[in-house]
Image (cartoon, rainbow, N blue to C red):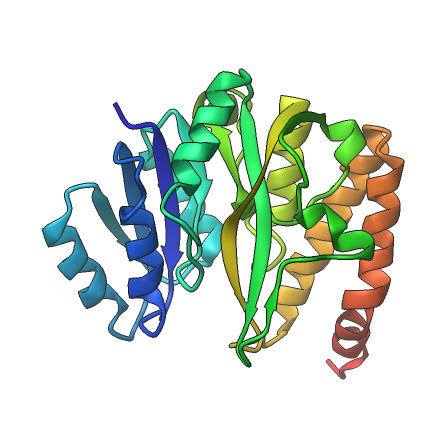
Amino acid sequence: MTKISVIMPVYNAEEFLLKSVESALAQDLYDIQLICIDDGSDDDSSRILKSIQQKDDRVILEKQSNQGSGVARNKGLKIATGDFITFLDSDDWYPSIDVLSTLYEKAVEYDQKIAGGSFIRHYHNGKIESEFKGIYKAYKFDKEEVISFKNYQFDYGYHRFIYNRKMLIDNDIDFPDYLRFQDPPFFLNAMIKAGTFVAVNKQVYAYRKSHKDIEWDLGKVKGLLSGLLENLIMSRKMGLASLHWLILTRTQKEFWHIINQKISEPV
């Protein structure tokens, strides 16, 4: 029986792919499947994945033309058979071998549809960030407990969680077809449906930061705006005032210069 399906979209990730995949396959929870969706890579990613697949039958490899990570993750959701689903980007990794076993055991112990832990950032210059302030303090959990989403009200860091697959299927929860910012609407939909989740005081996801720049073309800006708007509509509908304020604050601080630059360009 597959306990967790790990879904990994892959696009031109040859530099970091091996570390990412090995961190999943080295987990002490053996009953997993790693579903790698090659999103039209034109580097050595495909060969690396095929080589790994030949050595471990828990690896499932699918290919598609380049359609974006959201489409790739949705394809993985259709293939997955695990009791729970989680997502790992091809340039990130699990910081310890007991990440998945801990999340699975706590989800079962507390009878929760979602379980998650803390986030750490690894910067290209060697800096490691594990303490977060202000609107990003919710990246870290200080104790093990069941939390109501109405008390949490955060929509970033969906990688840090495992999700009950049946809950996702029964409620048609997947990733919107945006070129950017597909993750927060998925996360918010799942959390609203679950209502509560169990948090563990453990670093469960290592995120590689500042090693690549985003080229903000019009399609990506449209995706960003669509995702932000979707979460604003959901937060208002569900009476999540703190989250609504957080999204507006984040839009102003993080994204307004990107949006303004793009809409100011001549057609």
Q: Residue furthest bottom?
A: 266
Q: 101 or 259: nearer the eye?
A: 101
* Numbered circles on residues, count: 0
Quadrant of the drawing holding the C terminus:
bottom right
In the foreground, 247 or 208? 208
Determine the residue positioned at 69% across, 57% down. Answer: 131
- Residue 242 vs residue 53: left or right? right
- Residue at the left extreme of this rendering: 54
Image position of 199 (left or right of 231): left
- Percent x, y of residue 42: 29, 73
Give the residue at x 62% y 23%: 194
Picture quarter with the N terminus: top left
Rendering quarter of residue 185:
top right
Which residue does the image show at 50% across and 24% down from the upper left?
Answer: 107
Residues 32 and 78: in front is 32
Give the image quarter of residue 51: bottom left
Lateral position of residue 153 relative to residue 114, left or right: right
Residue 267 position (above or below residue 28): below
Relative height, residue 267 to residue 5 (above, below):
below
**Residue 144 x/y as whole percent:** 62, 31
Residue ID at (56%, 37%): 116
Q: Is residue 193 in view from this perspective?
A: no
Horizontal side of residue 43 vs 211, given as left or right: left
Q: Position of residue 174 (x, y in %)?
A: 52, 37
Residue 12: percent from left, percent from top: 36, 71
